[in-house]
Image (tube, rainbow, N blue to C red):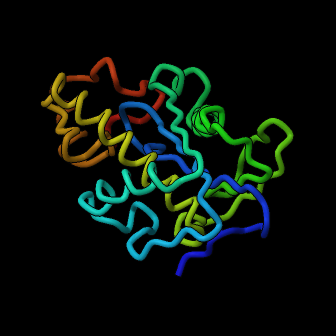
């Protein structure tokens, strides 16, 4: 069962990102502040949920959250500043969107760059421990999937509708055959050995 908060009686934002390991497209992060009494039977780490469940949860999260935001860092910026920094930047951009200023931030993972002097805690597998991080993981994943499906219409050969830019065999085979698209991350290892 997921926990409601990490620090009691605090306006706490949960943060997570999606698309770090992809070969193409942006990295997308979300920040979510949930009401203290928020509960949901389905909500969990987005990786453990079906696409159908994630899409069902997104409007519920957006409606019930006290505040939420989504931050995007494109493939060109990723190539310029590296994926780790791009992940942090996407989270900062998501936090910038919050209409309520959090008093604390909990992040899925083990590293983060401090944001505006707000205390933060990094929690490994936080998206399967805390509602706010799980909610952020669902928003980040669904918003990124929407972007990749639009890009798929432009470049269907890479099968982004299915693989969302992750390094599947079919995706790598398409890169091998057709070369990289304008949306590929050129600093990533696009082809397997």
Q: Quadrant of residue 12?
A: bottom right
Q: Is 10 on the left or on the right of 125, as rendered? A: right
* Location of residue 52 in the rendering, given as x and y in whole percent from the top left corner: 24, 59
Q: Is 7 on the left or on the right of 28, as rendered? A: right
Rendered view: 67 above or below 150: below
- Toward the right, the furthest residue is 117
- Toward the bottom, the furthest residue is 1
Regarding residue 186, the answer to whether it shows in the image is yes
Which sits in the foreground, 18 or 98?
98
Q: Could you tell me which residue is drawn at 68 percent across and 64 percent down?
A: 123
Q: Please give the count of numbered marks on the rendered protein.
A: 0
Q: Is 59 on the left or on the right of 44, as rendered? A: left
Q: Could you tell me which residue is drawn at 57 percent across and 20 percent down?
A: 80
Q: Quadrant of residue 93?
A: top right
Rendered view: 160 above or below 119: above
Q: Could you tell me which residue is drawn at 74 percent across and 47 percent down?
A: 102
Rendered view: 97 above or below 131: above
* Location of residue 37 in the rendering, given as x and y in whole percent from the top left corner: 60, 71
* Location of residue 22 in the rendering, given as x and y in whole percent from the top left corner: 39, 41
* Location of residue 176 in the rendering, given as x and y in whole percent from the top left corner: 21, 31
Q: Is 175 on the left or on the right of 68, as rendered? A: left
Which sits in the foreground, 159 or 40?
40
Rendered view: 51 above or below 27: below
């Amino acid at each position: 069962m997921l926990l409601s908060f990490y620090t009691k009686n605090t306006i706490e934002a949960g943060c997570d990102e999606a698309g770090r390991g992809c070969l193409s497209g942006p990295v997308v992060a979300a920040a979510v502040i949930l009401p203290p009494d928020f509960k949901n039977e389905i909500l969990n780490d987005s990786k453990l949920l079906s696409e159908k469940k994630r899409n069902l949860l997104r409007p519920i999260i957006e409606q019930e959250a006290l505040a939420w935001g989504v931050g995007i860092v494109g493939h060109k910026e990723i190539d310029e500043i590296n994926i780790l920094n791009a992940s942090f930047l996407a989270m900062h951009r998501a936090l910038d969107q919050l209409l309520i200023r959090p008093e604390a931030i909990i992040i899925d993972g083990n590293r983060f760059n401090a944001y505006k002097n707000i205390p933060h805690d990094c929690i490994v597998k936080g998206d399967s421990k805390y509602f706010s991080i799980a909610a952020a993981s669902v928003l980040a994943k669904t918003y990124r999937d929407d972007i990749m499906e639009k890009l798929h219409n432009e470049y269907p050969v890479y099968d982004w509708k299915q693989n969302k830019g992750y390094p599947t065999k079919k995706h790598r085979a398409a890169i091998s055959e057709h070369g990289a698209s304008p949306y590929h991350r050129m600093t990533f290892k696009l082809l397997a050995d």
